[in-house]
Image (cartoon, rainbow, N blue to C red):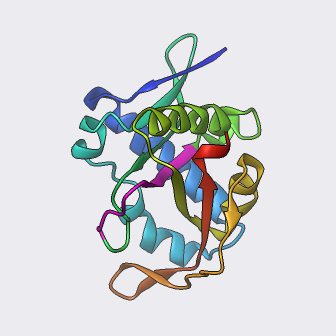
Amino acid sequence: MVTVRAATHDDIENINHILEQSYRKLMSNSCSMHFINAALPFKIQISDAFIKSKRYAVAETVDGKLIGCGGWSDEDPVTHKTEKDVAHVRNYATHPEYIKEGVGRKVFEWCRREAQKEKFKLFECLSGLNAEGFYTSLGFYKTQKRIREIEIRPTVFIDVIHMQYDLNES
């Protein structure tokens, strides 16, 4: 059995480990190892402020092993601006040993309920090409906005797909 809860400061090291393991494995289907090695140090650092927001969750097994994570914020990850009623899905990952076991879906359901409690109406997501199928399976849809080459750090870019999920319809 897997449970989902709000992440705490004590979880940060394990969260970063899950992000690194998951992204390294799953991104290898759509990105070169050179890119992954250059990008990962900037994609796998969860901030203490994100944890303190209580908008970041972890999934854990009965024995307390963290196997998944993900969250949302009201700040756009690229522009750092906020838009009324819009929340942004961020930093989802499942440990490679638990992929395709519903862990990501459970984390998403926790995030969806929490965002609805705060009266958000829309989730937005900048999905990596490798994660499009996952987000589609949750009910996200592509928008007309296809953003290519978001800069992760100077000279390191990633292709993303802009997706949305209507929080009022679930």
- Indicate whether 4 appears above or below 157: above
Could you tell me residue 44's position as x and y percent?
A: 40, 55
- Indicate whether 30 appears above or below 99: below
Q: Quadrant of residue 86?
A: bottom left
- Indicate whether 76 appears above or below 8: below
- Indicate whether 133 appears above or below 155: above
Residue at 67 percent across and 44 percent down: it is: 169
Could you tell me residue 128's position as x and y percent?
A: 60, 67
Could you tell me residue 154's position as x and y percent?
A: 32, 85
Query: Looking at the image, which is closer to me, 128 or 76?
Result: 76
Question: Is 120 positioned to the left or the right of 163 in the image?
Answer: left
Query: Looking at the image, which is closer to me, 20 or 133?
Result: 133
Q: Residue furthest bottom?
A: 155
- Image quarter in which the N terminus is found: top right
Residue at 68 percent across and 56 percent down: it is: 140
Total labels: the figure holds 0
Q: Is residue 131 magenta?
A: no
Q: Quadrant of residue 94?
A: top right
Question: Is 16 positioned to the left or the right of 165 in the image?
Answer: left
Q: Is residue 87 magenta?
A: yes
Residue at 72 percent across and 33 percent down: it is: 102
Question: Is 136 positioned to the left or the right of 24 in the image?
Answer: right
Q: Quadrant of residue 152?
A: bottom left
Which stretch did the figure color magenta? 80-93
Residue at 72 percent across and 67 percent down: it is: 29
- Image quarter in which the C terminus is found: top right
